Image (cartoon, grey):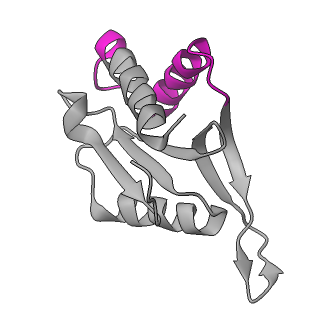
Amino acid sequence: MTYKELSSKIIGAAIDVHREMGPGLLESVYEECLVHVLREMGLRVETQVQVPILFRERSLGTPLRLDILVEGRVIVEVKAVETLVDIFMVKTLSYLRLSDRKLGLVINFHETRLKDGIRRVVNGLDEE
């Protein structure tokens, strides 16, 4: 499955969750619902995945924690905030770099129209 196909499935699942639940809930609620829908679609989904942070060949004591990892390839960061700010995309790009992955999606469920709250973050992704 290409990154484009996989991201389309993830976005479609997020839209389904948003359509059913609407805006205004906690991030943890949206994360749980999204994981449920993605698994119903037959996708392999991991939650709260720890990624060690290496600094000068030493693993730091506090690992990163990814909200959702789909098919071991796409990081999904779930938000429920008034406005997406650049730091969310920068943080996701750092997660991609440190975990050696190519694609991340930041999804803000607080938007009236979910498509306005979706940002794609790439780390050297050639495939569309």
Q: Which residue is drawn at 54% across and 47% down?
A: 75
Q: Which residue is drawn at 73% across and 77% down?
A: 54
Q: Is residue 26 visible?
A: no
- 19 relative position to 3: left or right: left
Q: In this view, does 81 lie above or below 54?
A: above
Decide whether residue 36 is among the magenta residues: yes
Q: In this view, does 32 lie above or below 6?
A: above
Q: Which residue range is magenta in the image?
A: 19-44
**Where is residue 78 drawn, in percent x and y?**
45, 40
- 61 relative position to 126: left or right: right
**Where is residue 28 drawn, in percent x and y?**
52, 31
Q: Can residue 23 be seen in this view?
A: yes
Answer with the quarter of the image where residue 69 lies.
top right
Closest to the observer: 109 or 93? 93
Decide whether residue 78 is among the magenta residues: no
Answer with the quarter of the image where residue 14 lies.
top left
Which quadrant is home to the N terminus?
Answer: top right
**Where is residue 115 drawn, in percent x and y?**
23, 33
Closest to the observer: 118 or 82? 118
Q: Which residue is drawn at 46% across and 50% down?
A: 104
**Where is residue 86 drawn, in percent x and y?**
29, 63
